[in-house]
Image: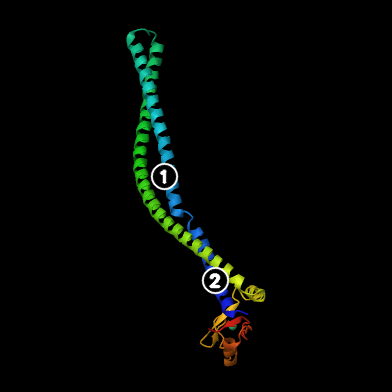
Amino acid sequence: MDIAGLYELQKIDLNMDKARRRVAQIRRKLEEPEELKQVRNTVATLRSELERLHARQLDAELNSRQLAERIQESERRLMSGEVRNARELEALQSSIESMKRQRAQVEEVAIESMQQREAHQRQLADQQAVLARLENTWLTQKAALEEEETKYRRFYAQLKQQRQRLSERLSADALSLYAQLVERKAGIAVAAVQNGACSACNMALPTGVVSHARTAAGAPVFCPSCGRILFAA
Ligand SMILES: [Zn+2]
């Protein structure tokens, strides 16, 4: 059994796991930041509020002009001598006064709307500047993340090819033992011997086991503690 080959396979699989995890992590980071979404919402809200205020102002201005015309017409009639009846004159007079009060109110609404629009416009300009800055930062980050993702995807594809070539070289027995151990031992089937200990479970290995792992050509030697295949370089 090609133990060095299985150890190589193990390294490839761990790197493939790492690449997969990193890509998943990058995909999560590629979600637009909450702060950016919020500022974009604020800008949209301010825009529609501005439209509403503008419509309110135009309405009030139109109303005021119409009232002005009606007041003018009534005043003309009052002064023209067309109306002679005292009660009618009084009614006309009081209608003019009422329209003037109404017009004053409408004018106030127009001015108030205009002032609110100015305040909103300043806020909108501020928020648009914040949005532009956040968008710029985000686009730079996003481009870097996408570049990193491409790099990891390419790396993953290379590993996959390496794995394919290596698998073709390994025996069916070796591959099946490896697959069983990967399944049972949390993804790690082969452990290197490092300073006389198993690199997976860190248990010190009896010297007999270490030398056996070094010399046993072909037969797998297992860690007595965790049961993984030992690889001694
Ligand atoms: Zn072990």
In the image, residue 211 sits, relative to residue 147, either above or below, namely below
The image quarter in which residue 191 lies: bottom right
**Label 2 close to label 1 by CB (< 8 Å):** no
Residue 77 is situated, as x and y percent measured from the top left of the image, at 36, 11
Residue type highlighted by circle 2: Ile
Of residues 35 and 100, the one drawn nearer to the viewer in this rendering = 35
Task: Tell me which label, 2 or 1, sits earlier in the chain.
Answer: 2
Amino acid type, residue under disc 1 in the picture: Val
Query: Which mark, by number, is residue 193?
Result: none
Residue at the far left in the pictured view: 79
Indicate which disc residue 43 carries: 1
Q: Determine whether the residue tagged by mark 2 lies in a helix, strand or loop.
A: helix
Determine the secondary structure under disc 1. Answer: helix
Q: As drawn, is 172 to the left or to the right of 151?
A: right
Question: Label 2 belongs to which residue?
Answer: 12
In this image, 42 relative to 221: left or right? Answer: left
Taking the spot 38% from the left edge, 52% from the top edge, the residue there is: 136
Nearest the eye: 38 or 101: 38
Q: Which quadrant is home to the N terminus?
A: bottom right
Look at the picture and state if 22 lies above or below 197: above
Determine the quadrant in which ligand 1 lies: bottom right
Percent coordinates x, y for residue 178 in the rendering: 63, 75
Is residue 151 or residue 205 the one in the foreground? 151
Respond yes or no on whether mark 2 lies under 8 Å from ligand 1: no
The image shows residue 174 at horizontal and vertical percentages of 64, 76
Q: Is residue 25 visible?
A: no
- Residue 232's place in the image compared with 166, above or below, is below
